[in-house]
Image (cartoon, rainbow, N blue to C red):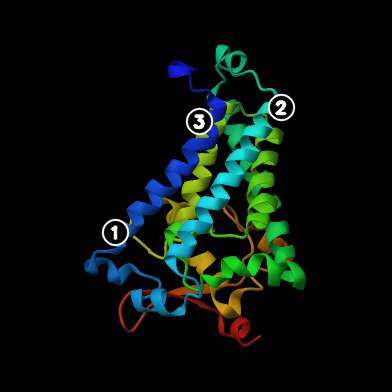
């Protein structure tokens, strides 16, 4: 790789940079009063309902990213991927698309079942996963605010399985993990913006995941970050509607029968 930076190192660092740049864009957009009409929650709710400070969230995410970077570098070292050998033989777009789709399905399956188990196991929820649910009102840079153990089990191992089982090269992984990072940030951004392709193309989007963060939705919508198939197949999908809020903006509302249960 030019400048002496390997694809393995870029595949580790670039998604971290992408996380803060993309979430920073949402922080910037959220500062405009004109966008109040596109919020899923008011700024007041974001400040009052969350159970953790934004400073603590930033520190928690940085710690998790540091630990994940170490694990990722160790993974690349152990697998012994030869970057030069991979780049000497360019892959066709069809092969790359297949690898991306395989990685998406692997990550989706792993994170659904791990995420669901962390909700159903009282010990894991109380001591591990409940940390993420201190964000009752999600926002972009809190997307990866998790307990370090959850970061390892859910994100790091899920990412490693996606990389290994898809057969993608370290160079391809730069783009895949950056894409997955952007998608995760988008799912937590709290803004329903017109023209957002993630919200238009994926049923698993900001409004969908917002239902899960609401107190009465925590037993539903476990799927992340791409598809909703596991929720639908296994009966954990919560139908919802996106409606205008009286004070401005939108609100994700679960169907009444589900909310009452």
The residue that appears at 38% across and 64% down in the rendered structure is: 191
- Residue shown at the point (61%, 39%) measured from the top left: 70
Residue 215 visible? The answer is yes
Counting residues from the start of the chain, the first of labels 1 and 3 encountered is 3
Badge 1 vs badge 3, beta-carbon distance below 8 Å: no
Left or right, residue 101 beside residue 54: right
Q: State whether residue 208 is above or below residue 227.
A: below
Say left or right for 78 vs 184. right
Counting from the top left corner in percent of width and height, residue 199 is at 44, 57
- Estimate how packed mark 1 is, as few (under 14), some (14 to 19) or many (20 or more) residues with alpha carbons within 10 Å: some
Q: Nearer the viewer, residue 30 or 54?
A: 54
In this rendering, the answer to whether 94 lies above or below 156 is: above
Residue 102 in view here? no
Q: Secondary structure at mark 1?
A: helix
| Residue 208 percent location from the top left of the image | 52, 65
In which quarter of the view is residue 48 placed? bottom left
Q: Secondary structure at mark 2?
A: helix
The residue where tag 2 is placed is 79
Q: Which residue is mark 3?
A: 10
First in sequence: mark 1 or mark 2?
1
Q: How many marks?
A: 3
Spatial separation of the CA atoms under disc 1 and disc 2: 41 Å
Tag shown at residue 29:
1
Q: Nearer the viewer, residue 246 or 239?
A: 246
Looking at the image, residue 42 lies above or below residue 86: below
> Is residue 149 positioned above or below 216 on the image?
above
> Which quarter shows the C terminus?
bottom right
Question: Who comes first in sequence, dot 3 or dot 2?
Answer: 3
Residue 119: image tag: none
CA distance for labels 3 and 2: 16 Å
At x 62% / y 37%, what residue is drawn? 72
* Mark 3: secondary structure: helix
């Amino acid at each position: 790789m030019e400048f002496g930076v390997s694809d393995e190192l870029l595949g580790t660092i670039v998604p971290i940079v992408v996380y803060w740049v993309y979430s920073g864009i949402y922080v910037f957009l959220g500062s405009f009063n004109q966008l109040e009409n596109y919020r899923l929650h008011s700024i007041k709710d974001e400040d009052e309902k969350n159970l953790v400070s934004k400073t603590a969230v930033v520190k928690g995410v940085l710690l998790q990213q540091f630990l994940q970077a170490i694990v990722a570098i160790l993974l690349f070292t152990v697998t012994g991927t030869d970057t030069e050998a991979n780049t000497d033989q360019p892959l066709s777009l069809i092969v790359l698309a297949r690898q991306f789709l395989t990685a998406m399905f692997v990550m989706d399956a792993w994170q659904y079942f791990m995420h669901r188990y962390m909700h159903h196991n009282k010990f894991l929820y109380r001591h591990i996963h409940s940390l993420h649910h201190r964000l009752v009102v999600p926002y972009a840079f809190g997307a990866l605010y998790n307990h370090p153990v959850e970061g390892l089990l859910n994100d790091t191992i899920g990412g490693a399985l996606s990389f290994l089982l898809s057969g993608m090269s370290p160079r391809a992984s730069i783009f895949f993990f950056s894409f997955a990072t952007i998608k995760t940030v988008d799912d937590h951004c709290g803004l329903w913006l017109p023209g957002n392709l993630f919200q238009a193309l994926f049923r698993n989007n900001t409004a969908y995941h917002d239902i899960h963060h609401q107190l009465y939705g925590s037993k539903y919508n476990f799927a992340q970050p791409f598809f909703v198939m596991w929720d639908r197949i296994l009966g954990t999908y919560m139908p919802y509607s996106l409606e205008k809020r009286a004070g401005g903006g939108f609100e994700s509302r679960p169907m009444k029968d589900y909310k009452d249960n």
